Each structure stands twice: as structure tokens, then as C-alpha cells.
Image: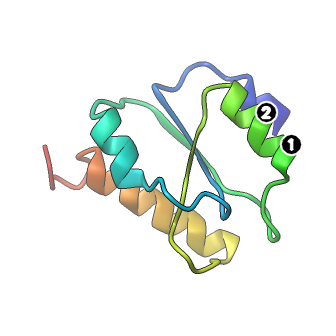
Amino acid sequence: LDELLERNDYTLKLVSWEKETSKYIRDIYKEQQKADNVIVLIGPEGGFTEEEIQKSVEKGFKPFSLGPRILRCETAAIVSVALVQHYWGDLGIFS
């Protein structure tokens, strides 16, 4: 995780966090509509620790929610990438 947090070659850095209850990917899109290189961190089963989230926020990652249901990490990764593609135009929706 520390190695990923140190990378600076992304224009948008996201971290999925089950304890985030008010910010969704659509909210982040409204704040930042241009993103050429995106990284999304998905925690292991059981989620990230508070310390890991704090470190990621300090490095510029934006926590977001995938809703009230806890998803398996494999499913959360697929859902997150699909949402990023949807909002940032990779699927031709908004572009």
C-alpha cells in the first residue's frame, strides 16, 4: 500500500471505504470532471484500517462510498472501475 500511496502519476486518486457514508463517485466527478489517469484503491476483505485511510487521504486520495452494502473486494473493484469509466467518459456516456 505504501508504494501505491507514493505514486504521483495519477490525476485522480480514489479509495473505496465502507465507513464513508456521504461521498460517492458521482460527487467526486462533480468536483473534478477531468481525469486522465485514475487509480482506485480497494481494500482487502475486512476493509482498510483507519490508519491506512488517513495515510491515503494525506497523499491526496479521495474516499468514496459504494453504498450501504458491503461488497466482496473483487466485486468492489469491478463496480468502481465501471463507475469511473461511466463518469469520466470512457464509455461515451458524458463525453
Q: Residue 78: image x %, image y %?
A: 51, 67
Q: Is residue 94 left or right of residue 42?
A: left
Q: Is residue 20 left or right of residue 35?
A: right
Q: Which three-letter amino acid code belongs to the residue tagged 2?
A: Lys
Give the residue at x 61% y 27%: 60
Mark 2 in CB contact with mark 1 (< 8 angstroms): yes
- The three-letter amino acid code for the residue at tag 1 is Glu
For disc 2, the marked residue is 55
Q: Residue at x 77, y 37 (%)?
A: 54
For the view shown, which residue lies furthest in the bottom direction?
A: 69
Residue at image point 23% right, 55% down: 91
For numbered disc 2, what is the local secondary structure?
helix
Q: Nearer the viewer, residue 57 or 85?
A: 57
Q: Which quadrant of the structure image shows residue 68?
A: bottom right
Q: Is 43 located above or below residue 54 in the figure?
A: below
Q: Quadrant of the N terminus?
A: top right
The label on residue 51 is 1
Whole-percent x, y for residue 25 in the image:
41, 53
